[in-house]
Amino acid sequence: MAHEHLPGLFIRGVNPPLRLADYGLVAFDMDSTLINIECVDEIAEAAGRRAEIAAITEAAMRGEIADYKESLRRRVALLKGVPESALHTVYSHHLQLNPGVERFVQTCRAAGLATLLVSGGFTFFSDRIRERLQLGEARANVLEIEDGVLTGRLVDQPWGDIVDGDEKRRTVLASCARLAIEPSQAIAVGDGANDLPMMGAVGLSIAYHPKPAVRERAMISIIHGGLDRALEVLR
């Protein structure tokens, strides 16, 4: 239910104020959480297939496509032939940090939390966002590029070819183990269905302008305002 003193925030299962210092790790989704776009949809614009790809993205984010890996492979396949320069255009002209992101990340870092970006998006963008926000670690999917053109395939990584919800959860739990903290001492921040596994594995889940299925399960849902509104609950 909405906390009576914090309009635009929905809080369940926790009693604010909470102490940031009680946590050791904060893990972030990227697309539509830290940044204002779904990168695959913006790249699709260059392929003239935005509507087709965006429809798959929306269905996956709502949880209507159970197999996230298959949905992403379908979308990436439709990007075959897009020039690598289109990725630079998306980053330079369309991608922005969401409101309150820099303040929230800086506050977490100042409180001593380790930071992790774990994304079902692409390393072309996550590596840049990691550097921009000075995040400690990032994991995402790798677009295959040959002769300056997207092939429509993803590059296999040690964990497999796609970071899906299960891989997000595994990555967060592995980070907790490396930091020698309990999962209950971690925070996960996301907006879509593939964020639910990691959000359900940690001590505090924060949803930023979430899809309905995520809003129903997150401990803190930010419905209005920037990501730094979470700091109204965290000290």
Image (spheres, grey):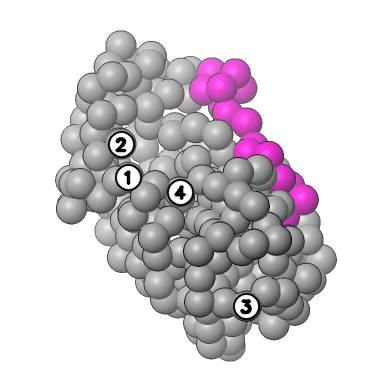
Instruction: Check disc 2 and give the amino acid type.
Output: Glu
Q: Residue 179 carries which label?
A: none
Which residue is labeled 1 in the image? Answer: 61
Which residue is labeled 3 in the image? Answer: 15
Placement of 89 over or under 73, stated as above or below: above
* Distance CA(mark 2)–CA(mark 3): 32 Å
43 displayed left or right of 233: left
Instruction: State the residue in front, 184 or 145.
Output: 184
Instruction: Check disc 3 and give the amino acid type.
Output: Asn
> Mark 3, mark 1: which one is toward the viewer?
3
Question: How many numbered markers are drawn?
Answer: 4
77 displayed left or right of 50: left
Q: Are marks 4 and 3 in contact (CB under 8 Å)?
A: no
* Distance CA(mark 4)–CA(mark 3): 21 Å
- Say whether disc 2 or disc 4 marks the residue closer to the N-terminus: 2
Instruction: Check disc 4 and give the amino acid type.
Output: Pro
Crowding near the residue tagged with mark 3, few <14, some 14–19, many ≥20 C-alpha atoms within 10 Å: few
